[in-house]
Amino acid sequence: MKFPLAWLLFNKWLWIIILSLSAILVGPFIVIILILNLPSPELRGVATFMIVFGWGIAAGFKDWVISKRSEERMKPHAFETAE
């Protein structure tokens, strides 16, 4: 039984997934190379600190959004509290 793969190669979602995964894998290496090519060690330290600081802010914001969503789900509605 011959299985035609032409439909798979023309599927746009396959290429979106392949390009997304490639960007996820190659992107950090490009950032590291750019940081290592900075002219002074002080700039390398500042760039690394800014990445870690931004990562922490993004993680904190994500946790805050998740906690707000869970509070909204737990909040009793007006018709549930009326007696």
Image: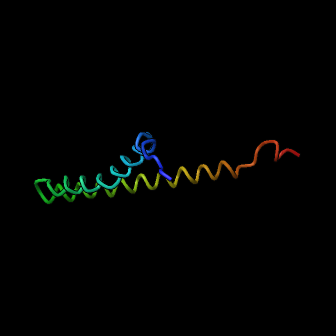
Query: Residue 8, position in %: x, y?
Result: 44, 45
Coloring scheme used:
rainbow
> Dividing the picture into quarters, in which one does residue 51 lie?
bottom left
In the picture as drawn, the residue positioned furthest to the right comes out as 83
Question: Relative to the observer, which residue lies in front, 37 or 23?
Answer: 23
> Dividing the picture into quarters, in which one does residue 37 lie?
bottom left
Query: Residue 65, position in %: x, y?
Result: 54, 49
Q: Residue at x 40, y 53 (%)?
A: 57
Q: Residue at x 38, y 48 (%)?
A: 20
Q: Residue at x 23, y 57 (%)?
A: 32
Query: Residue 45, position in %: x, y?
Result: 21, 59
In the picture as drawn, the residue positioned furthest to the left comes out as 39
Question: Relative to the observer, which residue lies in front, 4 or 78?
Answer: 4
In the picture as drawn, the residue positioned furthest to the front comes out as 1
Figure check: 79 above or below 1: above
Is 19 on the left or on the right of 59, as rendered?
left
Figure check: 82 above or below 46: above
Is 83 on the left or on the right of 35, as rendered?
right
Q: How many marks?
A: 0
Is 34 on the left or on the right of 16, as rendered?
left
Query: Residue 16, position in %: x, y?
Result: 41, 43
